[in-house]
Image (cartoon, coloured by chain):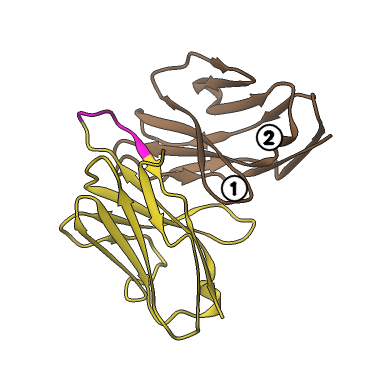
Chain colours: A brown, B yellow
Amino acid sequence: AQKVTQAQTEISVVEKEDVTLDCVYETRDTTYYLFWYKQPPSGELVFLIRRNSFDEQNEISGRYSWNFQKSTSSFNFTITASQVVDSAVYFCALSVITDSWGKLQFGAGTQVVVTP
Amino acid sequence: GAVVSQHPSRVICKSGTSVKIECRSLDFQATTMFWYRQFPKQSLMLMATSNEGSKATYEQGVEKDKFLINHASLTLSTLTVTSAHPEDSSFYICSARRARGRGNTIYFGEGSWLTVV
């Protein structure tokens, strides 16, 4: 069985501070995909990034960056110089090849609150 | 623009009635779609896997007779909440898997807010 843990329930920061969201996953599969999604109050899921288990290269995209470490089963996400528009719930998710690829196991989510 | 469209985005129904939610892939064929439910301030939980031309696969604890899923075409899956009750009020969201060969990608619909009064 797969499991995704986002231990941080809520993070509050002041604008321009950096925010790091933790994600720890569990799976026995060797081939899997990890995702981060943003969910604003309107509800839709905004895709941020996808990583497969063979690609540990970290990535930076604008103010977003991701740190994937298989050794610790972590896939952390950092928002640099946060803005009020970053306020949302962020979900980490896992999908394994052997169990109907595309079927996502979501973490509990982390509410990010950015105040001016 | 959206590649997976979900309709309606919001619906209010009376207790005891049924409501249908559609999930449509707009520019690709989706043999597999997924339905999730999200209660307020909670995570998204998979309800079922919808397979075109065959029966849906339900997750443990999800009543298949209450949440009817039909995937009659390669671009449309529907979720019908039968005999809805206030505890069924939730956010329902679907995703569609793009067929292999065109890249392994999943797309989410915009979600549907269901309120049962």
Q: Main secondary structure of the magenta part?
A: loop
Residue interval drawn in magenta: B101-106
Few, some or many residues within 10 Å of mark 1 (<14, 14–19, 20+): many
Residue A87 inside the magenta-drawn segment: no
* Residue A42 located left or right of residue A2: right
Secondary structure of the residue carrying tag 2 is helix
Question: Which residue shows up at 56% across the image and 81% down it?
Answer: B117
Quarter of the view holding residue A33 = top left
Quarter of the view holding residue A66 = top right
Q: Which mark is residue A86?
A: 2
Position in image of residue B60 (x %, y %): 39, 63
Picture layout, residue B8 above or below residue A44: below
Question: Which residue shows up at 42% across the image and 17% down it?
Answer: A55
Tell me the CA gap for discs 1 and 2: 18 Å
Question: Which residue shows up at 35% across the image and 52% down it?
Answer: B34
User: How many numbered badges does the structure rendering display?
Assistant: 2
Q: Nearer the viewer, residue A31 or A48?
A: A48
What's the amino acid at mark 2? Asp
Picture layout, residue A36 above or below residue B114: above
Q: Which residue was labeled with disc 1?
A: A108
Few, some or many residues within 10 Å of mark 2 (<14, 14–19, 20+): some
* Residue A18 located left or right of residue B87: right
Position in image of residue B36 (x %, y %): 44, 56
Picture layout, residue A93 above or below residue A61: below
Q: Quadrant of the N terminus of chain B?
A: top left
Secondary structure of the residue carrying tag 1 is loop
Tell me the chain of label 2: A
Question: Which residue shows up at 46% across the image and 45% down it?
Answer: A105
Q: Residue furthest top?
A: A57
